[in-house]
Image: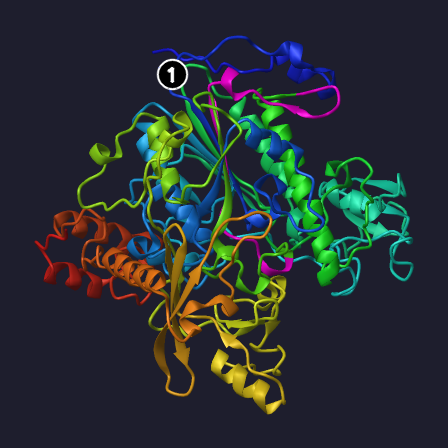
């Protein structure tokens, strides 16, 4: 059946100034109810519910988000949505519908993690399901489902990984976030000089600032820049993809110290492109196409892809925006609301300034989301600049969600920065979820029912008219629950009666040692997950590895860090748990932690139990002082809820069993697994893969023996 895109904005209106379009351009047509909708899926990075006034929060000085607000008011706000505590596990649940303990994607993927903790090409992902219904699928920006060039040995599918996972088009990055800020600003100064990665104006820093200079581009061209509208020329040059040489005139060739190969946080990237024809392109950091503000690039590329689609085929686009992941860095001045001071002199490493920068990044993100809808024809701008969005006149569903709670330095009160991203507490897993589309009944609703990030897997299937119970084999345990009924039926009763989240350690080679320790002061915790010093410091951490706080040799463990701190007369820090799990019902929440005891070198299990709610503006949070298990006795009601949640978690975790030798996830160890082992024993020099059953970082004979020993085994 032929389908029409039913877009609001006429092509002629796209071509003219956005401000010239008004509500008179709206179509009065209603999409046919049988047409499968397009899906625009927007993922916000490290973006908890604490950031948004439309959800009742936002802190004392909230960012202005008129475009997100307009989308929320035209759809349904899910005020009780849970993610996983970090990005990769959550993003995997979007497209697999399965909890991390089933998939082994239990934490943000870093270079040391084996393929066993990355999304498997044998998973039946959302794009694979939707393709059966005629959809074309794309990802633009970050999705962080695999390894990357930081350690090719652990990324067996290389640059084509997203195509192998089912997407027709991928245009983004395999890394988990922007690279660290280049404090040399492209090689023009000593490291540490420019803490935000660009040369400020003299009004911001008279000691190192400059109000004029030469702006070089990667193609060798140069133009002089001076102070304009109080915007530092160094920042303007960076926005344009250039490197600014302060106080200098343009030369015929760039000076030797100008370095376009340096990554600089939000203004550079390495873009990997997988096209539908099977071709792969890599745009390196020195490529002019790869430079410029990431959020703008993510929007530009998304608009280009959507506007290339034909009306006879439905599409799903997943946009993985980088913001507001660290490192925090000022966005282009032109993306900020009118009257906002440029504030180029902010220090990106100072906690008070980081809060201002976070707000700027949220406001810039909101501006680009609005532009995405306008330039794809899903909305228009009114004369006053506000977004006129009427999803009932489109055939596109817009979904906006955060991938996990906000990271510590950016958390808004009354939420808890020490229990934020990385932890299963409310600040770490409570995220905004907005769904708008032509099928939404009574738009503007705020829904209190529990939903989980896995449930989006169900929603995407429901929208495409896929029955996941029939489409997936019995051996593929799905944790997703329906979401569509909430959109179409305002009286829909709660479907979930419990919600679950977890974070743990991804699988690393048995031959490797853990990464060096990093202490995160805002969370008062020591972690061993960051392989590089710069990544630790980007998280606001203190590096205790080689060359860090403890000297040239560094320390090998968080236990050693605490010994060091005590010897220095300082208080020890908490050690990040080996695993963290949480389950809740309507009013109570149980948290289970497994943490190393440094004295005994054994893993100890502890529990916490809280009464929680989602009241605005002051929710009842799961802060340590409210742990009910520290009280002498629980009330009968509390005891019953504690017992029930403990039983629910046990039953849930027991619903999964490992299946040695089954690499292709079909629940049977058979000849197909030998074929899969043969493939990955040859690809990528036989290194890490989903057939590396003994987790030594190699796919070799020892893994084949495990298949042969389990041949014929059926896992149910």
Q: Residue furthest left?
A: 712
Say what secondary structure mark 1 lies in. Answer: loop
Observer able to see residue 294: yes
Compared across the picture, whether 667 is left or right of 606 comes to left
- Residue drawn where x is 36% and y is 52% of the image: 585
Most foreground residue, 380 or 415? 415
Q: Is residue 181 above or below residue 434?
A: below
Q: Is residue 458 left or right of residue 205?
A: left
What's the residue at 62%, 37% (across, down)? 297
Is residue 606 shown above or below 623? below
Residue 292 appears in the figure: no
Q: What residue is pinned by disc 1?
A: 35
**How many callouts does the rendering have?**
1
Q: Position of residue 541 (x, y in %)?
A: 61, 68
Q: Is residue 683 magenta?
A: no
What segment carries the magenta color?
381-409
Q: Is residue 399 magenta?
A: yes
**Quadrant of the rendered structure where residue 326 is?**
bottom right
């Amino acid at each position: 059946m032929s389908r029409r895109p039913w877009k609001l904005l006429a092509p002629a209106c796209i071509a003219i100034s956005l401000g010239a379009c008004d509500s008179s351009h709206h179509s009065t047509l209603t999409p046919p109810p049988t047409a499968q909708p397009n899906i625009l899926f927007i993922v916000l990075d490290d973006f908890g519910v604490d950031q948004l006034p439309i959800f009742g929060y936002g802190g004392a000085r909230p960012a202005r988000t008129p475009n997100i607000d307009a989308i929320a008011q035209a759809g349904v706000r899910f005020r009780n949505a849970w993610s996983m505590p970090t990005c990769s596990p959550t993003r995997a649940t979007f497209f697999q519908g399965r909890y991390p303990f089933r998939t082994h994607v239990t934490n943000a993927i870093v270079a040391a993690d084996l393929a066993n903790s990355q999304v498997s090409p044998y998973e039946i992902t959302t794009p694979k399901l939707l393709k059966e219904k005629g959809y074309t699928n794309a990802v633009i920006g970050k999705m962080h489902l695999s390894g990357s060039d930081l350690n090719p040995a652990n990324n067996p599918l290389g640059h084509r990984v997203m195509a192998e996972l089912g997407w027709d088009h991928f245009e983004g990055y395999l890394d988990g976030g922007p690279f660290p800020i280049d404090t040399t600003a492209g090689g023009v100064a000593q490291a540490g000089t420019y803490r935000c990665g660009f040369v400020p104006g003299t009004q911001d820093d008279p000691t190192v600032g400059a109000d004029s200079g030469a702006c070089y581009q990667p193609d060798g061209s140069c133009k002089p820049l001076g102070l304009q509208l109080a915007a530092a020329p160094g920042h303007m040059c960076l926005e344009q993809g250039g490197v600014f040489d302060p106080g200098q005139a343009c030369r015929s060739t760039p000076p030797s110290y100008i370095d376009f190969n340096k990554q600089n946080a939000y203004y550079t990237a390495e873009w990997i492109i997988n096209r539908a024809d099977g071709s792969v392109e890599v745009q390196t950091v020195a490529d002019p196409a790869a430079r410029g503000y990431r959020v703008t690039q993510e929007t530009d590329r998304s608009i280009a892809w959507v506007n290339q689609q034909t009306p006879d085929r439905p599409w799903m686009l997943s946009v993985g925006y980088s913001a507001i992941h660290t490192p925090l860095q000022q966005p282009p001045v032109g993306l900020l609301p009118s009257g906002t001071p440029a504030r180029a002199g902010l220090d990106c490493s100072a906690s008070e300034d980081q809060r201002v920068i976070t707000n700027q990044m949220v406001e810039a993100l909101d501006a680009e989301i609005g532009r995405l809808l306008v330039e794809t024809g899903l909305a228009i701008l009114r004369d006053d600049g506000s977004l006129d969005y009427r999803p009932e006149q489109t055939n596109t569903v817009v979904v906006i969600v955060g991938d996990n709670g906000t990271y510590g330095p950016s958390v808004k009160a009354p939420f808890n920065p020490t229990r934020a991203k990385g932890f299963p507490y409310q600040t770490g897993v409570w995220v905004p979820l907005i769904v708008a589309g032509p099928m939404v009944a009574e738009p503007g609703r705020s829904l209190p029912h529990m939903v989980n990030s896995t449930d989006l897997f169900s929603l995407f299937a429901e929208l495409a008219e896929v029955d996941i119970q029939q489409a997936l084999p019995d051996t593929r345990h799905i944790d997703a629950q329906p979401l569509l009924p909430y959109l179409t039926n305002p009286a829909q009763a709660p479907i979930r009666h419990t919600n679950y989240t977890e974070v743990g350690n991804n699988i690393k080679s048995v031959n490797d040692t853990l990464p060096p320790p990093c202490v995160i002061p805002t969370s008062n915790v020591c972690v061993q997950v960051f392989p590089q010093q710069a990544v630790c410091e980007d998280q606001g951490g203190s590096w205790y590895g080689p060359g860090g706080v403890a000297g040239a040799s560094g320390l090998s463990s968080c236990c050693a860090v605490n010994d060091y701190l005590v010897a220095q007369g300082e208080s020890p820090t908490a050690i990040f748990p080996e695993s963290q799990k949480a389950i809740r019902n309507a009013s109570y929440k149980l948290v289970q932690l497994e943490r190393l005891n440094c004295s005994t070198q054994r893993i100890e299990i502890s529990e916490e139990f809280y009464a929680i709610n989602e009241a605005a503006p002051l929710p009842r949070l799961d802060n340590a002082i409210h742990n009910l298990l520290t009280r002498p006795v629980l009330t009968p009601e509390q005891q019953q809820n504690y017992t029930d949640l403990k039983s629910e978690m046990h039953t849930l975790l027991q619903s999964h069993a490992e299946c040695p030798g089954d690499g292709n996830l079909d629940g049977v160890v058979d000849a197909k697994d030998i074929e899969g082992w043969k493939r990955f024993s040859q690809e990528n020099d036989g290194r890490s893969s989903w057939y590396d059953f003994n987790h030594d970082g190699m796919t070799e004979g020892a893994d084949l023996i495990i298949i042969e020993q389990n041949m014929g085994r059926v896992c149910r």
